[in-house]
């Protein structure tokens, strides 16, 4: 069995090499992303592993079929950048890593919120300039707030435990109720009800499809004055300009964004030489009421190891048995 792994970062390499040695399976490591050109390196291999934020060109899967490769294993959760029709047409099976570390993302959402509640961005900037005055950066306490958790999958449930540990009042919404959260009586009947009654809204939802946002001008108008939005889910859950305007006007007190609707080509890139041309993102970065980070909520040693190894385990399972527990069933 021979596998090829695309878009491999430096922090993933050792985990992949260790897995290859432990399982006695050849894995070719490719740092380039998976494109219509780089797929040619997969000739002679049995399966393709990949991770990237950019869209996958449908031609990739035509060529995989031509090469006799019928499994692609993603090192991440999301599949919205894949042309599913092309996979189905070429009889290519798909796996992902559905959970690499829910706790990492949940912890990060709370970390960002605490930084915003205690005005850490503003305070650190002052201290860096040797201004040690307290005012006007007085903080708020999480234990006195109602936190609305939108989405109670693995990450949302991990977040609920942490917020409860701080003593916050937690409410939750999900189309599909989790029995443990149900027992606690945390669910509200609608997303609108959650937005209206929360001091903090933290998003742990999948993408709802193009144009379907949770936070926008209309929903913001129904939210509490001074509420805060935290998003470690998907950038397209928020109409960012509406969110920015609401913070600027004072309707909302701030936001923590680890994802951004226009992040592709920006996040995980060095634009310090002045190449950032996104004026909205520039404005949020400069505003102390916004905590902006480049899609790193997942980024821990544990999570990276799980992404690297679970994707390879799933690939082997697919090739040896014809299916795996992490296979995504494609509608035909």
Image: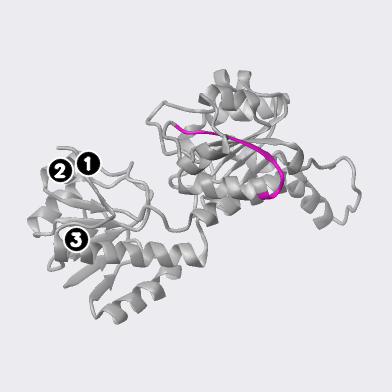
Few, some or many residues within 10 Å of mark 3 (<14, 14–19, 20+):
many
Query: Whole-Å distance between the Cαs marked 1 and 2?
Result: 6 Å
Q: Residue 10: x, y in percent?
A: 43, 69
Q: Which quadrant, please, contains the C terminus? A: top left
Identify the residue at image location x=58%, y=45%.
Answer: 160
- Locate residue 80: give its quadrant: top left
Q: Position of residue 315 (x, y in %)?
A: 23, 63
Q: CA distance from mark 3 to mark 1?
A: 18 Å
29 magenta-colored: no
For the record, the magenta segment spans 165-174
Can residue 31 be seen here? The reply is no
Name which residue lies at 43% across and 58% down. Answer: 100
Q: Position of residue 14 (x, y in %)?
A: 40, 76
Between 101 and 169, the residue placed more toward the observer is: 169
Q: Which residue is mark 2?
A: 88
Label 1 CA crowd tier, 10 Å (few <14, some 14–19, many 20+): some
Position of residue 229 measured from the top left corner of the image (x, y, whole percent) = 62, 35
Q: How far is the residue under mark 2 from the one under mark 3?
A: 16 Å
Which residue lies under the disc numbered 3? Answer: 318
Residue 172 part of the magenta segment: yes
Q: Is residue 71 left or right of residue 241?
A: left
Residue most extreme to the front: 183
Residue at x-position 72% and y-position 28%: 226
Looking at the picture, does residue 174 appear above or below residue 139?
A: above
Q: Are marks 1 and 2 in contact (CB under 8 Å)?
A: yes
Above or below residue 22? Residue 32 is: above
Secondary structure at numbered mark 3: helix
Number of callouts: 3
Residue that mark 1 sits on: 84
Quadrant of the rendered structure where residue 130 is? bottom right
Which of the two marks, 2 or 3, is nearer to us in this view? 3
Mark 2, residues whose alpha carbon is within 10 Å: few (<14), some, or many (≥20)?
A: some
């Amino acid at each position: 069995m021979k596998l090829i792994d695309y878009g491999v970062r430096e922090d993933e390499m050792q985990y992949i090499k260790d897995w290859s040695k432990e399982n006695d399976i050849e894995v070719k490591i490719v740092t380039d992303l998976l494109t219509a050109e780089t797929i040619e390196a997969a000739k002679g291999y049995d399966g393709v592993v990949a991770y990237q934020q950019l869209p996958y060109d449908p031609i990739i899967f035509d060529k995989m079929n031509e090469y006799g490769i019928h499994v692609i294993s993603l090192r991440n959760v999301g599949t919205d950048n894949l042309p599913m029709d092309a996979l189905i047409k070429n009889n290519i099976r798909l796996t992902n890593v559905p959970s690499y570390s829910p706790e990492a993302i949940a912890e990060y959402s709370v970390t960002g919120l605490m930084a915003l509640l205690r005005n850490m961005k503003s305070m650190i900037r002052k201290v860096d300039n040797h201004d040690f005055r307290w005012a006007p950066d007085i903080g708020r306490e999480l234990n006195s707030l109602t936190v609305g958790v939108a989405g109670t999958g693995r990450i949302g449930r991990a977040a609920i435990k942490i917020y409860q540990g701080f003593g916050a009042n937690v409410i939750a919404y999900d189309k599909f109720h989790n029995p443990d959260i149900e027992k606690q009586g945390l669910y509200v009947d609608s997303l609108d009800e959650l937005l209206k009654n929360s001091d903090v809204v933290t998003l742990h939802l999948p993408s709802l499809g193009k144009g379907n946002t949770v936070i926008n001008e209309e929903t913001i108008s129904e939210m509490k004055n001074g509420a805060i939005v935290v998003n470690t889910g998907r950038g397209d859950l928020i109409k960012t300009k509406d969110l920015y305007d609401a913070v600027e006007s004072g309707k909302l007190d701030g936001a923590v964004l680890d994802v951004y609707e226009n992040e592709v080509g920006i996040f995980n890139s060095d634009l310090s030489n002045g190449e950032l041309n996104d004026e909205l993102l520039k404005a949020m970065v400069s505003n102390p009421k916004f905590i902006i980070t480049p899609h790193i909520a997942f980024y821990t040693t544990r999570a990276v190891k799980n992404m690297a190894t679970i994707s390879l385990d799933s690939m082997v399972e697919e090739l040896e048995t014809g299916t795996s527990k992490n296979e995504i069933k494609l509608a035909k």
